Image (cartoon, rainbow, N blue to C red):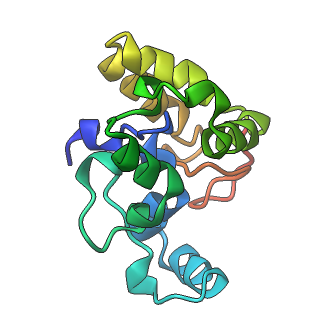
Amino acid sequence: MNMMDLVGRCGLYCGACVIYRAQRDDQSLRAKIAHRYNCSTDEVRCNGCGALTPGCWGNGCKIFQCTIDMGVNFCFECKKLETCGIFNNLAKGYLEDGVDLRKNLQKIKEGKVKEWLTESQKKYTCKECNKPLAYSSKCHHCGAQII
């Protein structure tokens, strides 16, 4: 796996995406997601924004499609970012969970991608079991509460 594949076009760290984590870590979580979205467990898969294949979940992402339509690689490159309803709704939701997409995009824009990826990988590692976390309030491996 190439860490650069985990750089989300919107500023998300793909390594903590519940789809990405469920595919790699937790088949019961993968089954719950499939049930929730009325799809097969095989469809609950993604390699990160930097390595999408035709069957990846991320191909259905509105942000991903928007960046393609706008001819940009990342949201920060788009002239309409400040007024983009798709991005602003996503950013607002994640900010409520402590994830600042604008700050992340700024680091990417400044060329601090490797630093940001290292910080993100550390941030989204469970302090109890030392396994990767998904964006959630508890570890999907050991059940520890995430502070």
Q: Residue furthest right?
A: 96
The image quarter containing residue 8 is top left
The image quarter containing residue 142 is bottom right
Residue 56 x, y percent position in the rendering: 34, 68
Residue 91 x, y percent position in the rendering: 66, 37
Q: Residue at x 35, y 52 (%)?
A: 48
Q: Residue furthest top?
A: 110
Q: Is residue 6 left or right of residue 51?
A: right
Q: Residue at x 63, y 25 (%)?
A: 82
In the picture, which quadrant includes the C terminus? top right
Q: Residue furthest left?
A: 2
Q: Residue at x 57, y 19 (%)?
A: 103
Residue 29 x, y percent position in the rendering: 57, 74
| Residue 131, visible in the rendered structure | no
Number of callouts: 0
Instruction: Tell me if residue 138 comes above or below residue 115 in the rendering.
Output: below
Residue 50 x, y percent position in the rendering: 27, 46
Instruction: Tell me if residue 144 comes above or below residue 9 in the rendering.
Output: below
Instruction: Tell me if residue 106 comes above or below residue 34 in the rendering.
Output: above
| Residue 4, visible in the rendered structure | yes
Closest to the observer: 33 or 60?
60
Q: Residue at x 63, y 53 (%)?
A: 139
Closest to the observer: 56 or 65?
65
Closest to the observer: 136 or 107?
107
Q: Is residue 103 left or right of residue 27?
A: right
Q: Is residue 111 left or right of residue 126?
A: left
